[in-house]
Amino acid sequence: MTQTLKRRIGLGLLTAYGVGVIVGAGIYVLVGAIAGVVGVWTPLAFLLAALVAAPAALSYAELSARIPEAAGEASYVEQALGLHWLAVAVGLAIVLAGTISAAAVLRGGTGYLVAVLGLPFAPLMLVLGGGLVLVAVLGVLESLVLAAVLTVVELIGLGLVVYAGVLAAPVEDWIRPGPLPLAGLGLATVLAFFAFIGFEDMVNMAEEVADPSRTLPRAILLALAITTLVYAVVSIVTLRAVPVADLAASERPLALVWERGTGGSAGFLSLIAGAAALNGVLAQVVMAARVLFGLGRSEARLAAFHHAHPRFGTPVLATLVVGGAVLVAALVLPVAALAGATSVVLLLVFAVVNLSLIVLKRRAPEAPFRVPAWVPWAGLGGALAALVLSLGGLA
């Protein structure tokens, strides 16, 4: 065994990884939920959410250049605040969030595929999940190439939705929009914010990225910009093509766009949504395993995970443990229970990470990539505000 990961990832693959894990399968259902709150003003909610996410993404970009290590958030807290127990807790929280998120997405993606393929749920889920874990073990380049292929598939699916939406005649809701519901805009923005979660996973690939101090910040900002554009365009054509009431009542809102615009069956979108879900599962397994690998460097009780296979160059034990936990959680826990825990955990992590950058910037202003001093303060405020809304039952 070795303790060094192989640097095989460039800007293109890392950006594709980021876009894939951010977009995931959520856009295929989230548009309807947000439309139920603010109607045709849904695109505005996505744009506001991007503005809320931007400070956190910028903070991660600077931190990834300052401290390019696999257990990204844990390393940031350790070096900034000097609290080893908090650093380990943050790292384990990221592993937990990645595991439960992957389990939820695996269940959801399998459900899409079962509807099309007609195969039994549990065996199909185990085969899909097991196959993704095997890919993650065999190599990071192989994992990210597969993730990039799946990202292309899901973006093609969204492109087809945009095409169908342009063909459809505009609905009455779009032609005569009602007044902006200010009371619901905050809730809609919080809901849309969770569609941008995923950029934080990118920093945990730092030890396998070529020239990480330069590549990581650029990839994070590119992924966020691409995702914002995709969400804006998809939400605009969706609200233009389908009545708000129909979107809010559907679990397959983008399928309605295809059916309204072309008159054809949208069964193929279920296959694409399933591919998007598999992409999300693979990305989370790869990320969580790297966090365990990084934690093993500084925490003796986790030292067994700080080993990379000499041939594959991947943290095999960490990958198998995370993958096994994903499969077990997906089998025994409902999606709602899995997904509900992720947002609160990540918002707490975001708050601590932005606080860490505030401290680091005061201690050492110079960095390979720097953002203005107000950025981490904005990220901290945004995370705490979203956390309050979430804990208040609004998210």
Image: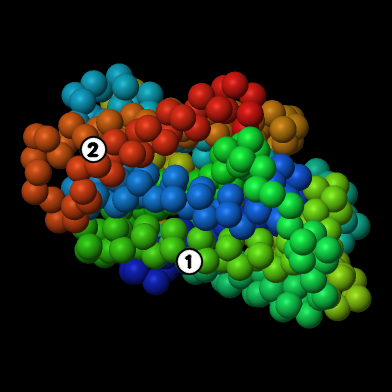
- Residue toward you, 36 or 207: 36
Crowding at dot 2, Cα within 10 Å, few <14 / some 14-19 / many 20+, comes out as: many
Tag 1: amino acid: Ile
Classify 293 as above or below 130: above
Check the image and tell me how it is coloured.
rainbow
Classify 52 as above or below 161: above
Mark 2, residue position:
357
163 relative position to 369: left or right: right
| Residue in view at x 87 percent, y 70 percent | 259
214 relative position to 201: left or right: left
Classify 202 as above or below 342: below
Residue 120 horizontal/vertical position (percent): 87, 49
> Could you tell me which quadrant the C terminus lies in?
top right
Q: Which mark is residue 51?
A: none
Residue 205 horizontal/vertical position (percent): 36, 53
| Residue in view at x 83 percent, y 58 percent | 243
343 relative position to 315: left or right: right
| Residue in view at x 23 percent, y 37 percent | 357
Tag 2: amino acid: Leu
- Residue toward you, 1 or 135: 135
Sequence-first disc among 2 and 1: 1
Q: Secondary structure at mark 1?
A: helix
Classify 158 as above or below 38: below
Mark 1, residue position:
226
81 relative position to 168: left or right: left
State the separation of the CA atoms marked 2 and 1. Answer: 25 Å
